[in-house]
Image: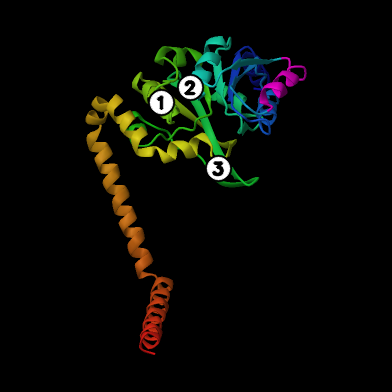
Amino acid sequence: MFFGAIFYLVILYFMTVSAIIPCFNAETTIERAILSVVSQTIPVSEIIVVNDGSTDASGRLLEDLKSNYPQLKVIHQENKGVSYSRNIAIQEALGDYILTLDADDYFDHSFVEKALIKFSQDLTYGAIMCGYVRIVKEKKIKPYIPPMVSLASCLLNNGVIACLLFKKEVLLKVGAYDTAMAKGYEDWDLNIRILKLGYNFGVVEEVLFNYSDIKGSRTSIATKNDLELKLQIYDKYKDDYTDNARYIFKELVQQNNNLKQEKQNVLDSTSFKIGHRIISSLSFVLKIVKFKLHNE
């Protein structure tokens, strides 16, 4: 058994992985992201960072970092957006697998190894994700392990984290990222196309990804344009939404019922009733005070 494990690890070392990282004004976090790739227990062959028109010191920093990390390749371009940047890096990548990472996030050191092992368990996997934790003001909160997704569930809600390990051939087959998703949800759109081709997303059920929840991030921008972007996805996959209408309707009704029940639980709670009485009493007192002031 020991020699079998050693043999399997040797095979893993021959699976070449390229990491791609779009970078826009990330001088304070980009080295941390790069280091999280360099420190993987399975070596990553190359790290391609696309400097997407940064106006801070990111470009100079990346050039300096190349002396510390020989596997680092830097592409400088005018600002063209995250989808264009990732697509350029995918085209340049030589690896059999593509590790996607954002400049302000980072992986734990064992993710690539565990993701490659997961790939060996099911040939239908087109990508492997893992659990994640949010980082807010340097504190890790809300660890979460995502469940398996299906086309129907992904049409309703993405369910796949943006940074994960893909088979490169799958990314090329689906046409990589759609640059028309300029305001966000480009990863959601990509995931739908991968699922439509019959591939699945494997899950390493450990928290191995660290997501920085930063004000003004791409995620927050996408949230502001949520309805517009969701309608864009709906229009693009209208037939698929029609085919899965019953599932989607059922899930939406269930979610609505859950919200109604949560609201009712709050209304029935002792704390709400006490608070309501206090507020009602204060409102009554304020009315009396206003009446007296008005008549003085």
Q: Is residue 120 visible?
A: no
Amino acid on which disc 1 is placed = Met
Q: Nearer the viewer, residue 116 or 183?
A: 183
Query: Which image quadrant is residue 158 in?
Result: top left
Amino acid on which disc 3 is placed = Lys
Amino acid on which disc 2 is placed = Ser
Q: At x 68% / y 34%, what residue is drawn? A: 28
Query: Could you classify mark 3 by the number of other residues whose Cα lies within 10 Å: few (under 14), some (14-19), or many (20 or more)?
Result: few
- Cα gap from disc 2 to disc 3, whole angstroms: 20 Å
Indicate which disc, 1 or 2, sits on the residue closer to the N terminus. Answer: 2
Left or right of residue 66, residue 126 in this image: left
* Highlighted magenta segment, given as a residue range: 57-70
Mark 1 lies on residue: 181
Disc 2 is placed on an element classified as helix
Disc 1 is placed on an element classified as loop
As drawn, the label of residue 215 is 3
Q: Looking at the image, do the residues carrying marks 1 and 2 touch, with CB atoms under 8 Å apart?
A: yes
As drawn, the label of residue 83 is 2
Q: Check the image and tell me how it is coloured.
A: rainbow
Q: At x 42% / y 80%, what residue is drawn? A: 282
